[in-house]
Image (tube, coloured by chain):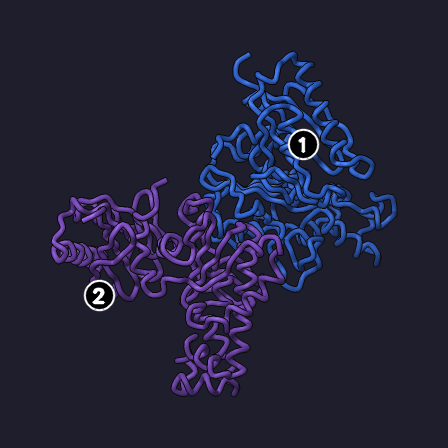
Chain colours: A blue, B purple
Amino acid sequence: MDGKLILGVDIGGTKSAVVLATEKGEIRQRRSEPTRPDLRGPLEVLERLAAMARELLTAENVTSGAVLGVGVSCGGPLDTKTGIVYAPPNLPGWESVPVRQFFEKALALPVRIENDANATALAEWRLGAGQGTRNFVFLTMGTGIGGGVIIDGRLARGANDLAGEIGHQTILMNGPLCGCGKRGCLEALASGPAIARLARESALYGRHRRVLTLAGGRPADITAYHIIEAAKEGDPFALQILEEAGTYMGVGIANVIQMLNPECIALGTIAVHAGDLIMKPIEAAVEEFAWKRSRDVCRIVPAALGDSGQDLAAVALWLTEPD
Amino acid sequence: MDGKLILGVDIGGTKSAVVLATEKGEIRQRRSEPTRPDLRGPLEVLERLAAMARELLTAENVTSGAVLGVGVSCGGPLDTKTGIVYAPPNLPGWESVPVRQFFEKALALPVRIENDANATALAEWRLGAGQGTRNFVFLTMGTGIGGGVIIDGRLARGANDLAGEIGHQTILMNGPLCGCGKRGCLEALASGPAIARLARESALYGRHRRVLTLAGGRPADITAYHIIEAAKEGDPFALQILEEAGTYMGVGIANVIQMLNPECIALGTIAVHAGDLIMKPIEAAVEEFAWKRSRDVCRIVPAALGDSGQDLAAVALWLTEPD
């Protein structure tokens, strides 16, 4: 075997996964199962993941001596220095859990931990849409809008690991309430739930019939995917909603361009699924709200890794040179 | 003499200065004169500055061997790698001027060049309000709102030296036209001219009598300083204008906190002169629009270097470790 292997642990609110990958980011083995934070405490979840990690090593017939390290990707807030995870919204019951320390003991390997948006940004930067750039920004565009920022070849973590919260910049000072408690955040205007809310509201008074049909006739069941599907069929109301969300997203991206002047911004989930239907309004808003000199050097593209981005996120913590 | 000296060249639209400073940022000699870009071409301006630099060396009786390097602070856009200055708005007639090359030849010394906001940010970080931090943001708050961003101990320049344009993030999508051509930029809402415009508009229909009196009765002569003066006297309209500008400034700062999670943000000129009259509304908006976890670790303070910040800006290019 040439080179060492990396263990990647992805702890999600719905499911968790452990992968064994090469130093080039090729996944050799993978195990995944529902996390069930409602039924299992943090320790039980972590012990399952450690057991799965050991299974992967056995399956590949490698000792821990062949492993460079363990990367853990987990919802924040968390402290990358102490390795403690503080009550992520998607992991109810996780209060100050010493995740890094746990894996260091359980697997007797060096462990790095990073919040999931930062870890996915590292993966997209090293293996996906951001390859070859020095200044790169990744934005998730799903349930929430998270972000990870690479500046001059290094992940920007900030004073206490909270840099990159691009989804919680203010776009409309008197805009809708965001899940975070603030008003008018980008996330409250352009995330999956924000898009679904726009459709749901107008479905209630008779518009968006196609979207409603796709959601089985129940307004409460409408998701961003129904809107994307209807828009792909040419439904004008669905197209209008994607245009509105894309415009807000474009303003938020323009602000990132003005502040950070990156060479590439990659957008996850919704941008990947909706393609031009959301990318075109994003580009139009960026053209209006960012300087030509800055946007001319910045590609705005859908994320390249797709679903494997999550698997590679934790692995990517060991692909980058340590600071 | 212990340690080497640094030559700092500040090229401004109104005046230019050359200073000779120690490696600790103590200014030993200084020469300054009006730039007059309307009367003198770039080459004439640069030759005067080189002559002034030589005068300083003679006055201190030092040879160029005792000089570590020359720092040049100049209005952007400019290219820090090639050292070429591209048509700064404050230097009419300067089209693609090879400033670094000029000083390298004229003074036979290594030269570094940086736009003025970035250079002042470096000075405030190494010698002023940002001392001891790893993540620091400086914002000018004068004729324009410029910015410089230090991330994890290094200046963030971006793909083509345009990072830190924090004054040209969008705060109001349908807001007033900015000098840059975009709409609703922070600079169009909270800079000196923006503050003066607010007062001027209401002075025209009878409010702001105190501000108008301070401006000699001529609405067109109102500047931000008249408003600060009237506010210090307790004039309610002037206070209201500073509160409005401070609120927009606070939203822009909150966005910086969300994206970059710095330990300190220092604000120049207007914040220094108006003090609490503008800092209080800024803080109130930051409390509303930034997360507690991020703002709790971030001091927001007036810049510490005052007028010497500009002199030290160019010097600071040699105080920082090269990347």
Q: Nearer the viewer, residue A105 or B96?
A: A105
* Marker disc for residue A10: 1
Are the numbered discs 1 and 2 placed on the same chain, yes or no?
Answer: no
Residue A29, x across and y down, in percent: 67, 19
Residue B301, x across and y down, in percent: 47, 62
Image mark 1: chain: A
Question: On the image, which quarter does residue B128 sit in?
Answer: bottom left
Quadrant in the picture for the N terminus of chain A: top right
- The answer to whether residue A263 of the structure is visible from this angle is no
Labels in figure, total: 2
Q: Residue at x 70, y 25 (%)?
A: A50
Q: Residue at x 54, y 50 (%)?
A: B261
Mark 1: secondary structure:
strand
Name the residue at the front extreme: A105
Q: Nearer the viewer, residue B110 or B298?
A: B298
Is label 1 in contact with label 2 (beta carbons under 8 Å)? no
Residue A193, x across and y down, in percent: 74, 49
Q: Nearer the viewer, residue B49 or A114?
A: A114
Residue flagged by tag 2: what amino acid is it? Glu
Q: Nearer the viewer, residue B268 or A257?
A: B268
Label 2 neighbour load within 10 Å: few <14, some 14-19, many 20+: few
Q: Residue at x 17, y 58 (%)?
A: B52
Q: Which residue does the numbered mark 2 point to in the structure image?
A: B33
Image mark 2: chain: B
Question: On the image, which quarter does residue A38 sit in?
Answer: top right
Residue flagged by tag 1: what amino acid is it? Asp
The answer for how far apart the CA atoms under marks 1 and 2 are is 61 Å
